[in-house]
Amino acid sequence: MGAGAGRGGDPLRELLLFRHAKSRHDEPGVEDHDRDLAPRGIRAARAMGAWLRSEGILPDRVLCSTAVRARRTLALAFAELAELPEIRYLRSLYLASPGRMLEIVRRQEGEVRRLMLVGHNPGLHGLALRLVAEADPERGRLEAKFPTAALARIGLPIEDWREIAIHAGRLLAYRTPAMLAREPPSP
């Protein structure tokens, strides 16, 4: 479990940014924090979980917004996995800014090598753009948008989460439910 070493043996940590799946907007009187997933979001969360399983990507720790749509996305995605990581639900991730999310990430302990944040836009999209190197050949895939249920996997050549530097990460993978629907099935 967890990330391996980077180029030249440098320690590599991974940050997985997972946006909640499509939520419902048709329930009068329901507060934003309490909105559940739409049927399309349920399908997308399961598809992203199946992709995580097929790629063997399991975080050491998950920090998830307390919003219903984020918690449900995580539960549906992780129902596809054989084992579960440590999960912490943080109200501070609800609609958090990129700067706030970065503060939260920097407070993680050293044994956490692969960390997942489950949250909201525009914060997750902004954080991904701040972390991925401007010269990264894959960066263009991120720039247009970060749709619901999108997941960015960012490699960070750091020994400690406090060392995260702006534009120092490498985009290891970026997937959306629409991309998965177009990919051929795994053998």
Image (spheres, rainbow, N blue to C red):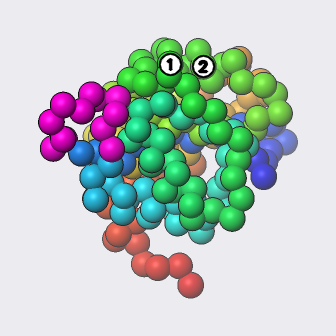
Question: Counting residues from the N terminus, which is met first, the one under dot 2 or under dot 1?
Answer: 1
Viewer-proximal residue, 103 or 66?
66
Which amino acid is tagged 2? Answer: Ile
Q: Relative to 85, does residue 110 appear above or below in the rendering? A: above
Give the main secondary structure of the magenta stretch: loop
Instruction: Kindly identify which numbered label has been placed on residue 75.
Output: none
Q: Considering the image in quadrants, where does the C terminus appear?
A: bottom right
Viewer-proximal residue, 13 or 35?
35
Q: Image check: 60 left or right of 63?
A: right
Residue furthest out toward the front = 29
Which amino acid is tagged 1? Answer: Ser
List x then y, in percent, for residue 159. Answer: 79, 27
Q: Residue at x 36, y 63 (%)?
A: 43
Q: Are marks 2 and 1 in contact (CB under 8 Å)?
A: yes
Bounds of the magenta segment? 25-36
Task: Locate residue 160: give its quadrant.
Answer: top right
